[in-house]
Amino acid sequence: MRILIFGINYAPELTGIGKYTGEMGAWLAAQGHEVTVVTAPPYYPEWKIRADYKRKGWYKEKLEGVTIYRVPLYVPKVVTAKKRIIHEFSFLAGVFPVWLKLLFKRKFDVVININPPFHLGIFALLYAKLKRTKLLTHIQDLQIDAAKDLGMIRNQALLKGMFKAEKYILKKSDAVSSISLGMQTKILVKEVLEYKLILFPNWVDENAVRPLGVADSLRQEWNIPLEDKVILYSGNLGEKQGLEILLDAADELKGEQDVRFVIVGNGGAREMLEARANSLELSNVQFYPLQPYEKLSALLATADIHLVLQKKLAADLVMPSKLTGILAAGGCTLVTAMPETSLYEVIDQHGLGLIVEPESAKALVEGISELLAMDRTIYKQAARDYAVNYLAKDQIMKDFEAKLHGLTGHANESID
C-alpha cells in the first residue's frame, strides 16, 4: 500500500503522539509499504524545536524507511490556549504547499489523519476527495471536548464552529480509529456510524521495555539510595494531568525521610511546578528531563510507585500514553480516575494498580501510604502480563494493517 500520514507530531519525539505515530510509520514501512508523512520538526514536549532541526524551513528527509516532509511552524515559549491555536494554524499554513505538491503526484491508497489538531483533517479530507482515495481519521485526544471541559476555550461561538467542523470531517472519513472504548463512545455521539469505528490502542514493545531490578535502575546515577521509596511521575507536564496535587502530596509527606517524589519530563507546566516546589521548600521532590528511549526500562525500575494522574473533566477525552510503558516494565501504578471511564475499568478489571479519586491530595496521600505498606508484587505481575497479552506492538500493528487492507481493498464492507 501507499500510505500518506498527516500529523503535527512525529519521530524523533520521545513521548506522546509523536512517539506512536513515528513507530506506526516505521513499522508499516518495515512491512514493505510505501509511507509518506507530512509533519512538523520535533518540538514536543519541550515546546522548543530541536537544535538540529532549527531554521530549516520546508525540507524532506528519510527516517526508518519513511519519506518525511517537514514544514515550519510557530512554537510558543509559553503555552496558552490562544498561542496554541496560532501554533496549530501556523502548521496548517506550512502544510499547504506540501499538500498542493502531493496532489500532482501519484495518488496514495489511504490517507491517515492524526488528531489532534482536528482541523488538520481539512487537508486530509480534501486530498482524499480530490484523489478519490480512502481517509482514516485516528483520534489520540478528543481535543475540542478537552478544551471545552477544561475551560481552555470559553468562546461559545468558536467552540460551536469547531465542533461543527470536527463532526463534518469525522462523518466524511471512511474510518475513524481511537485508542480506547471510552473514546469510541464519545465519538459515536458525534454521529459517526458505528461500522466505521476501529479500536487502535497505543502499544508497547514488550521486549524493549521490560522489568528490571532496582540495582539496574537510574537510582545510582541520580544518587537515590536503593532503600528509599520513590514515587515517580514521568511524562508530559501539562494542564490535563492535574499535577498540582502531586506537590500537595509531597508537602504532606515531607516528614517521611525515606519517601521522595521524582518528576521526569517537560511541558508547559514544568516551570510552574518547579517554582511551587521551591516555594514550599520541598526537598523531597526532584526534577529530571525526559530520558532517552534506551533508558526507559531503567527509568521505570527507579520507582516503587508510578503515578498516572488525570483531572475529572479529562475522563475519556485523553488516555495516558505513559501507562503502556509502566505496564510493560511491571510497575505498580497509582491512578486517579473516575468510575466508568476506560482508564478506571482497565486498571480495575485487570488488577493493575490502585485507583483513587482525581484532584484530591488527601486521596493521593492515602493511596501512596497504602501501596507503600503492602506487598506490591501482585500488581507488578498483573501489569507485565497485561502488557504482553494486550499491548504487544506487533500484534496491534498487524491488526491495524489488516484494517487498512480491508479499507482499501473492500471499501463497501463493514470494518469490525
Image (cartoon, helix red, strand yellow):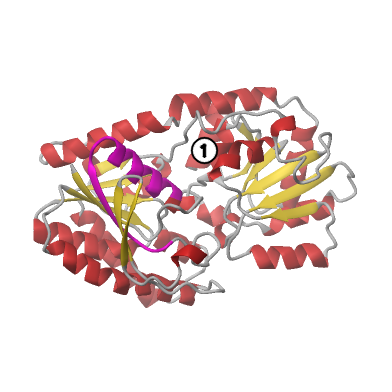
Residue closer to the observer: 363 or 99: 99
- Disc 1 residue type? Thr
Quadrant of the image for the N terminus? top left
What residue is at 52 percent from the left and 38 percent from the top?
324
- Residue for point 46% across, 71% down: 84
Q: Is residue 31 left or right of residue 110?
A: right
For residue 53: magenta? Answer: no
Residue 332 x, y percent position in the rendering: 66, 33
Category of crowding for the residue at label 1, using alpha-carbon neighbours closer than 10 angstroms: few (below 14), some (14–19), many (at least 20)? many
Residue 161 found in image quarter: bottom left
Q: Position of residue 79 (x, y in %)?
A: 54, 71
Query: Which of 303 and 245 lies nearest the eye of the viewer?
Result: 303
Determine whether, in the image, residue 306 is placed left or right of residue 226. Answer: left
**Could you tell me which secondary element the residue under label 1 belongs to?**
helix
Q: Position of residue 177 (x, y in %)?
A: 31, 45
Nearest the viewer among 309 and 259 is 259
Q: Nearer the viewer, residue 302 or 369?
A: 302
Is residue 68 visible in the rendered structure shown here?
Answer: yes
Q: Is residue 206 above or below residue 255?
A: above
Which residue is denoted by mark 1 in the rendering?
324
Would you say residue 26 sits in the magenta stretch?
yes
Task: Give, as a single range, the part of the protein colored magenta.
Answer: 19-41
